[in-house]
Amino acid sequence: MKIAILGVGAYAIALSKVFNKNKENTVSMWAKFKDEADVVMTQRENPGVLPGVKIDEDIEITRDLAHCMEGAKIVVLAVPAGAVRQVSEEVSFHARKDQILVVVSKGIEPRTNLFMSDIVYQATKNENICMLAGPSFAIEIANGSKTGFNIAGPNPEATKIVKEAFENGGLVVVTCDDIIGIEVASSMKNVFAIFMGMLDGMDMLESYKSSCLAVLVRDLGDAIVALGGKRETIFTYAGLGDMLLTCMSPKSRNFTFGQHIGKGLSMEEAFNTMAVKTVEGIYTLGTITELMEEKHFHIKSLEVLYGILYNGDSKDDILEKIRME
């Protein structure tokens, strides 16, 4: 089975290695930009995002999107969230109706407030769109770490095909029909990672942080339901699994950003301390807040974090402010 992976970033490279472990798969990667493509083709790695991790020699790298997608059963969109719309529009010129489009980009598009799978569907009208998510850092997956993933989508045959192509001895993949819930969880976990990183930067004790985390889990469930998903999706790899990973690890950019805020830095100062300036949770906080307002639904933890970051509200008594009744 041919797998086309669009993108040559850290996560795209990690996924290429997973798919390529299944020797029944043939993997092709698409690089959009010439400068990046030249480096990746020459060095067989992307040193700017995943230094030292080599792309398998039998994986094709091309700048020709049509060629990359030709004959592929599965097309994986592994580009930054901000590029999903443009890439989806390019994909629409080459995609077949029987191809399965797998989205791994996470977030909500500003202005439209659409999730990534919604954007892909709007551009392609493909009925076989899936979302792949789970607790996974690119470097760990690229180095063969074992973890669990969910593959979510409305077409059970499509999710089954992706599961069989992706799952190997190191990974567990579980299918799911709640793509909305997976999208919400995958987006909001970055916001909550800022929240938990902030508490860590404030040197709050473990019991305090655990109490706040319990409220955030409740809030995630409320948000999933408010936006049309299933509450039980919290208890999946892509739900609680990914949330715990992102909210507890300094490897997460969002968590690290939150730590800087907790230590008293302004948002600008926090950005300036970071080597990688992309903090997905900041953008998602604004869009998810707008979505909640559209639904006339209040999530106190989001409101408290927004007030601290944008209005200079006090960080005192956070647990009391978000208390679970």
Image: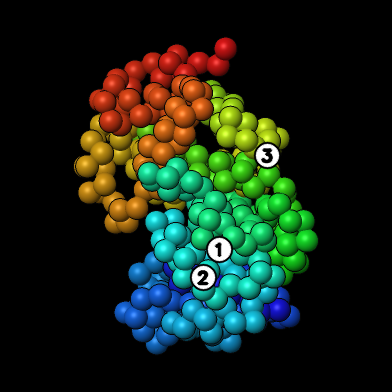
> What's the residue at 68%, 53% (across, down)?
153
| Mark nearer the N terminus (3 vs 2) | 2
Give the amino acid type for the residue marked by disc 3 in the picture. Thr
> What's the residue at 49%, 64% (across, down)?
88
User: What is the x, y in percent for residue 264?
Assistant: 25, 31
Do callouts 1 and 2 mark residues in contact (Cβ within 8 Å)? yes
Q: Is residue 288 left or right of residue 272?
A: right
Give the class, few, some or many, for how many residues have Cα within 10 Å of label 3's Cα (few <14, many ≥20).
many
State the quadrant of the N terminus.
Answer: bottom right
| Mark nearer the N terminus (3 vs 1) | 1
| Mark nearer the N terminus (1 vs 2) | 2
- Say if 212 sits above or below 65 in the image: above
**Residue under label 2:** 91
> What's the residue at 24%, 36% (across, down)?
265
Q: Quadrant of residue 75?
A: bottom right
- Say if 13 sits above or below 298 in the image: below
For residue 20, say whether it is visible. no
User: What is the x, y in percent for residue 310?
Assistant: 28, 30
Give the class, few, some or many, for how many residues have Cα within 10 Å of label 1's Cα (few <14, many ≥20).
many
Do callouts 3 and 1 mark residues in contact (Cβ within 8 Å)? no
- Say if 88 sits above or below 21 in the image: above
Question: Between marks 1 and 2, how big is the CA–CA gap?
Answer: 7 Å
**Residue under label 1:** 124
> What's the residue at 39%, 56% (across, down)?
82
**Residue under label 3:** 233
- Front residue of 325/125: it is 125
- Front residue of 69/189: it is 69
Q: Is residue 206 left or right of residue 277?
A: right
State the quadrant of the C terminus.
Answer: top right
Give the amino acid type for the residue marked by disc 1 in the picture. Thr
